[in-house]
Image (cartoon, grey):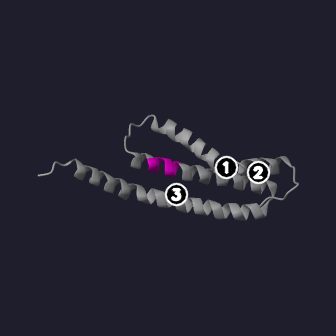
Amino acid sequence: MFTSGNTSPCHHSLHLFVKTDESQQAGIVQKLSDQALSHVIIEEDVIKNFFVNLAFENFEIATYHALLTLADLCGDRTAQQALKLSLNEEKSMATFVEEKIDPTIRTYIAKRKNEEQPLH
């Protein structure tokens, strides 16, 4: 994706940004999620998982926006094309997760209510 041997500050920043692996990204998102959820009392993992999933997708979207800016500053058109494809994939996934929040939580809560009702 990136021209090897280019040592400009722009390319160096772009390279370092790309080298952040998924476990580091997940750690960042987990820390952000923990901070956000520390203000919300939710015992249900299903609900928490949606918060984390949507936060992670939006973190990745923000990351690709930053990478696109760096690639533009570097004049790296090849990187921009690949990054735009990845950005669109992340936006699609974020939309998918967002669309599933309401029906999944409603189904989950309905099942929990049914489990809690006494048998006759």
For label 3, the crowd category at 10 Å Cα-Cα, with few meaning under 14, some 14 to 19 and many 20 or more, is many
Give the CA separation, mark 3 to mark 2: 24 Å
The residue type indicated by label 1 comes to Asp
The residue type indicated by label 3 comes to Ala
Could you tell me which secondary element the residue under label 3 belongs to? Answer: helix
Q: In this image, 119 relative to 102: left or right?
A: left
The residue under label 3 is: 94
Residue at left 30%, top 51%?
109
Give the magenta part as a residue range.
49-55
Q: In this image, 76 relative to 99: left or right?
A: right
The residue under label 1 is: 21
Task: Specify which label sits upstream in the sequence, 2 or 1.
Answer: 2
Q: Position of residue 25 (x, y in %)?
A: 62, 46
Q: Quadrant of the N terminus?
A: bottom right
Residue at left 50%, top 51%?
53
Q: Are marks 3 and 2 in contact (CB under 8 Å)?
A: no
Relative height, residue 118 to residue 77 (above, below): above
The residue under label 2 is: 14
